[in-house]
Image (cartoon, helix red, strand yellow):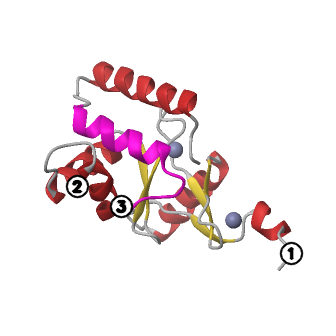
Amino acid sequence: MPLDKKRTSDVLECAERLCSERGVRLTEQRRTVLRLLCEADRPLGAYELLERLRALLRNPAPPTVYRALDFLLEQGLVHKLESLHAYVGCAHPDHPHVGQFLICSDCGEVSEVEDPAIARSLQAAEKAAGFCTERPVVELLGTCSHCARKPS
Ligand SMILES: [Zn+2]
Ligand SMILES: [Zn+2]
């Protein structure tokens, strides 16, 4: 995070392609929300997104933002960080996956790791417990390597 210009335009292009393959529409609003999330230097909450959208679109209403976010979540183009009530753009949306997130509580940096072994062992645990998971959320809160090196 944040993605540079090149990566952001790659992600947007990939999103366009995925949506047209799936026969769903990446409207201007949805696209703008995705771009803002990719460009942000930290996860954004719905209201922060709304603030940023105000500078770009005419009269965006809160339901607009929530609908755009629901769409992007459904399409796997963004992830929701439950512990922060905030959203991040996914850097590799081309395949369905369950990500895990390392969240730095000093600088707010979030990195997504994608470890299928973690997802698999959670699925096994779920199954053993007969638990029906709605949102498989794995978020690690702590200090990033950059902040850990800073002299205190
Ligand atoms: Zn992802
Ligand atoms: Zn940090």
Q: Is residue 21 above or below residue 44?
A: above
Instruction: Find out whether the residues at labels 1 and 2 contact each other: C-beta distance under 8 Å.
Output: no
> Can see residue 76?
no
Residue pointed to by mark 2? 66
The residue lying at 27 percent from left, 48 percent from top is 55
> Magenta residues: mostly which secondary structure?
helix
Say which residue label 1 marks: 151
Which span is picked out in magenta?
27-45
For badge 3, the amino acid type reads: Glu
Tell me the distance, in whole angstroms, between the alpha carbons under discs 1 and 2: 40 Å
Q: Could you say whether the residue bearing mark 2 is in a helix, strand or loop?
A: helix
Q: Nearer the viewer, mark 2 or mark 3?
A: 2
Q: Nearer the viewer, residue 116 or 85?
A: 85
**Is 143 situated above or below 74?**
below
- Residue that numbered label 3 is attached to: 134
Mark 1 residue type:
Pro
